[in-house]
Image (cartoon, rainbow, N blue to C red):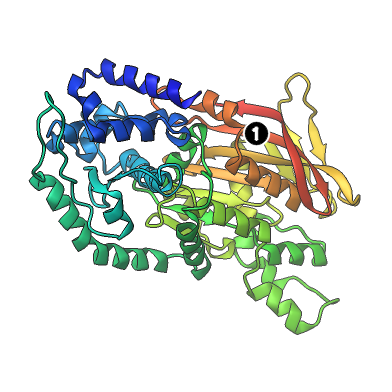
């Protein structure tokens, strides 16, 4: 869609909302129209609607209507009875809105004479001259004289001024809260979140409209979300001892007693006691931490050896790696169609297709002993153990398979249609499974395609 066409579409949208005619002569409304016509906003109808709603309510001096609950009702079509403490869609989109506004005024809108900001701690937009914004001055409303017949809005509304004051007062509290939040995760996750903040200005969007329901389901709401990377050390223990270990034995520390006669005691103890994971999983956690929907206050990075069964009854979880490197992956597979099972050898893992559909095979195996070969992976979004949360499984028959599945989540053109079909009219997401095939060259994924899907 061209920018001209996008502006025309936004004007049509504005007229449908019956906003005053004088809006067209207001520089602030014109600016909001230009911003909402850019590609990042055009791709997200709800984000564009969010921006135009809060700007319009501010221009007609209805800032009292700009509350989290009212935005949920007016922008996201939530019922009047919905509770924002249980549904944080507004907070999630507000973070994305702030990010995309920053990106616009740093990039495409760098020549704009006026900037829009939505200070943290509220949803009331403020307007500031570009020079003041670049100097880092507080974001108070910019006095603007409007042409007749539009009303003159020279004074700063008290609610807008207070929003700016709240922002300055909240900064120490927000910094302190961030420190507390990061303390509940491993140090590596804190560093990854910091990397996300540093990359915001230069990195392209890593999410899409089709993926938003998935990330909101995992990171939204009041429940915690555990990110559980693979236990690479455990995988090596299994390989060296030639003894696959089920989840129950893993939870009970059975890997501590595996005999490794071919290794010296020091190296064996390192494998038994230290936490090792793969670089692919590190990349995946980095990408998750950069998502606009990512909520550091609700995310806990938990090594598989430290996870408890009860954690998966009361929270959401993202489980990376198959059962041979992350035994927790097996806990959700009892209800799955595509299941990874180990064979007689640790290298004989297979994906079983319990109910093949036309054109599908009943099983898929990797030719792991070839430098270049086909391998397979599964992305599964399933209920947690109590049915009150969600599990996202990202697992492959080998490292290349897991890498391909993870990359699909952050470059989702191939799976967007699946996510769209799985999204209910109210925005919630049905359970689904996706079977992938990829080419592996020296354990690196080169391409991937969907072989089968299930939506429940």
Q: In this image, 24 relative to 314: left or right?
A: left
Q: Which quadrant would residue 101 be assigned to in this image? A: top left
The answer to which of 185 and 265 lies nearer the viewer is 185
SS label for mark 1: strand
Q: In the rendered image of this protein, does residue 61 appear above or below residue 136?
A: above
Residue pictured at 33% horizontal, 56% vertical: 134
Residue 388 x %, y %: 41, 40
Q: Residues within 10 Å of mark 1 (few under 14, many from 20)?
A: many
Q: In this image, 33 relative to 291: left or right?
A: left
Residue pictured at 58% horizontal, 61% vertical: 304
- How many labels, in total? 1
Q: In this image, 394 relative to 375: left or right?
A: left
Q: Is residue 396 visible?
A: no
Q: Which quadrant would residue 176 be assigned to in this image? A: bottom left
Q: In this image, 312 relative to 155: left or right?
A: right
Q: Is residue 165 visible?
A: yes
The answer to which of 4 and 46 lies nearer the viewer is 4
Residue 142 x %, y %: 19, 46
Q: In the rendered image of this protein, does residue 242 appear above or below residue 3?
A: below
Quadrant (top left, top right, bottom left, bottom right) of the C terminus:
top right
Residue 105 x %, y %: 39, 46
Say which residue label 1 marks. Answer: 434
Residue pictured at 24% horizontal, 52% vertical: 121
Residue 301 x %, y %: 50, 60
């Amino acid at each position: 869609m061209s920018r001209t066409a996008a502006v025309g579409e936004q004007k049509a949208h504005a007229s449908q909302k019956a906003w005053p005619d004088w809006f067209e002569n207001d520089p602030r409304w014109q600016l909001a129209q230009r911003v909402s016509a850019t590609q990042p906003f055009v791709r997200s109808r709800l984000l564009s609607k969010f921006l135009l709603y809060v700007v319009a309510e501010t221009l007609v001096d209805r800032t009292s209507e700009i509350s989290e609950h009212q935005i949920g009702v007016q922008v996201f079509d939530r019922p009047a009875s919905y509770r924002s403490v249980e549904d944080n869609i507004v907070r999630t989109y507000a973070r994305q809105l702030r990010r995309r506004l920053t990106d616009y005024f740093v990039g495409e809108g760098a020549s704009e004479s006026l900037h829009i900001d939505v200070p943290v701690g509220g949803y009331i937009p403020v307007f500031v001259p570009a020079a003041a914004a670049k100097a880092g001055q507080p974001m108070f409303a910019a006095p603007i004289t409007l042409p007749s017949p539009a009303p003159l809005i020279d004074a700063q509304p008290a609610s807008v001024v207070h929003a700016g004051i709240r922002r300055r007062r909240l900064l120490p509290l927000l910094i302190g809260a961030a420190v507390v939040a990061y303390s509940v995760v491993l140090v590596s996750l804190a560093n990854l979140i910091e990397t996300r903040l540093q990359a915001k200005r230069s990195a392209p969007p890593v999410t899409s409209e089709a993926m938003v329901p998935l990330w909101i389901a995992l990171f939204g709401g009041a429940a915690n979300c555990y990110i559980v990377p693979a236990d690479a050390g455990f995988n090596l223990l299994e390989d060296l001892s030639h003894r696959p270990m089920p989840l129950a034995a893993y939870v009970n520390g059975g890997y501590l007693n595996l005999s490794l006669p071919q290794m010296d005691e020091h190296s064996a103890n390192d494998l038994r006691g230290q936490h090792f994971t793969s670089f692919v999983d590190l990349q995946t956690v980095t990408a998750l931490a950069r998502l606009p929907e990512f909520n550091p206050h609700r995310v806990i990075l938990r090594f598989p050896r430290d996870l408890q069964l009860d954690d998966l009854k009361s929270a959401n979880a993202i489980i990376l790696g198959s059962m041979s490197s992350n035994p927790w992956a097996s806990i959700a597979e009892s209800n799955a169609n595509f299941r990874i099972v180990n064979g007689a050898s640790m290298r004989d893992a297979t994906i079983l297709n319990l109910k093949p559909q036309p054109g599908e095979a009943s099983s898929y195996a990797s030719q792991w002993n070839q430098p270049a070969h086909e391998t397979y992976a599964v992305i599964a979004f399933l209920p947690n153990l109590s049915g009150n949360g969600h599990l996202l499984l990202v697992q492959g028959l080998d490292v290349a398979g897991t890498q391909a599945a993870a990359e699909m989540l952050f470059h989702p053109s191939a799976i967007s249609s699946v996510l769209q079909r799985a999204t209910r009219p109210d925005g919630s997401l049905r359970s689904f499974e996706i079977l992938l095939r990829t080419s592996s060259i020296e354990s690196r994924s080169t391409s991937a395609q969907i072989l089968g899907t299930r939506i429940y």
